[in-house]
Amino acid sequence: MKINEFTQKAIDKFTADITDSLFLFIQNDKELMQDYLDLLENNERNVVNSSVAKAIKERFDLKNIGKSDAPVSTLIKTFEQFEK
C-alpha cells in the first residue's frame, strides 16, 4: 500500500465516524460535557445531538452515507456517517 492510499483510507474512515468522534471528545472534556448537560436541561437530547451532527456536516461540507448503530460515545445511540 502506498502512503497516499493509506492516508486517504484513514481520512475516509475518520470522516465516516466524525460524529461519534466529536461526541466522544465532548464526553471526555469536562467543560464541554458540562455545557452539553446544561443544554439538555432545556432541550431534548435528540434536538441537541441532531444540531451537533448538522453543524459537523455543514462545517466540513460532508454528505450522508448512512447510519451506524454502534457508537463508541455513550451520549448517542446512533449517528449519521459522512463522506466528503
Image: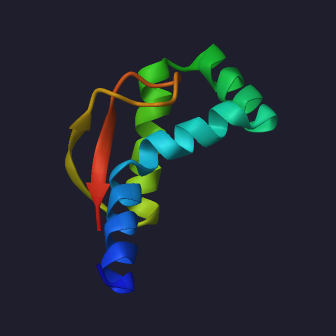
Q: Position of residue 11 (x, y in %)?
A: 39, 67
Q: Position of residue 6 (x, y in %)?
A: 35, 74
**Image position of 12 with respect to 19: above or below:** below
Regarding residue 80, the answer to whether it shows in the image is: yes
Residue displayed at 38% across by 48% down: 17
Q: Quadrant of the N terminus?
A: bottom left
Residue displayed at 64% across by 38% down: 26
Q: Residue furthest front?
A: 1
Residue displayed at 60% across by 19% down: 40
Residue displayed at 42% across by 66% down: 60
Regarding residue 61, the answer to whether it shows in the image is: no
Q: Residue furthest left?
A: 65
Q: Position of residue 80 (x, y in %)?
A: 30, 41
Q: Position of residue 7 (x, y in %)?
A: 40, 75
Nearer the observer, 44 or 36: 36
Q: Quadrant of the C terminus?
A: bottom left
Q: How many marks?
A: 0
Position of residue 25 in the picture relative to residue 12 (left or right):
right
Position of residue 37 in the picture relative to residue 14 (left or right):
right
Quadrant in the rendering for residue 12 = bottom left
Q: Residue furthest right?
A: 31
**Image position of 15 with respect to 53: above or below:** below
